[in-house]
Amino acid sequence: MDRLDSTFAALSDPTRRAMLAQLSRGPASVHALTEPFALSQQMISKHIACLVRARIVIKTKRGRESVCTLRPEAIKTVSDWAMSYRQLWEERFDKLDVVVRQMKQEEDDKKHGQ
């Protein structure tokens, strides 16, 4: 699985997206990431492991505590991919807009006998 696939797979889960929202405000301990969810420590650990495998999050040890930090460059990969498609679709919509305007003009010309 390439990096983009693993990133999208990691982002597909609402719990992981909520964790990323929390981490966007700064590093957090695994315990702090667990608090907002009614999930077992084991399930939270699996979610974190998925984010780490996708290289979206870095998990480090600080004494007895594990701390997670967001890697914004991983999200930038998704943003760059989406922006390339945005440009493509904007160009297509611009072309469609021209065609629709031409069709409306032709219809108006027919109505007014031109």
Image: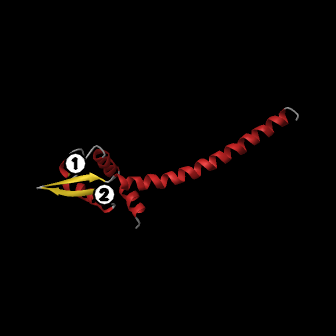
Q: What residue is rendered at 29% in x and 49% in y? A: 19
Quadrant of the frame with the N terminus = bottom left
Q: Position of residue 71 (x, y in %)?
A: 32, 54
Q: What residue type is labelled 2?
A: Leu
For the residue labelled by badge 1, is the local secondary structure a helix, a strand or a loop?
Answer: strand
Q: Where is residue 60 in the image (x, y as percent from the top left)?
A: 20, 57
What's the image's color scheme?
Answer: secondary structure
Relative vertical location of residue 79 with respect to residue 103 in this rendering, above or below: below
Q: Which of 6 and 26 is in front in this view?
A: 26
Q: How many marks?
A: 2
Q: Residues within 10 Å of mark 2 (few under 14, many from 20)?
A: many
Q: What residue is rendered at 38% in x and 58% in y? A: 7
Kindly give the residue lying farthest to the bottom in the view shown. 1
Pointer 1: what residue? 28
Q: Where is residue 31 in the image (x, y as percent from the top left)?
A: 18, 49
Q: What residue is rendered at 46% in x and 54% in y? A: 80
Pointer 2: what residue? 51
For the residue labelled by badge 2, is the local secondary structure a helix, a strand or a loop?
Answer: helix
Q: Residues within 10 Å of mark 1 (few under 14, many from 20)?
A: some
Relative vertical location of residue 107 with respect to residue 6 in this rendering, above or below: above
Q: What residue type is labelled 1?
A: Ala
Q: Nearer the viewer, residue 57 or 43?
A: 57
Q: What is the CA distance from the residue labelled 2 to the residue labelled 1?
A: 14 Å
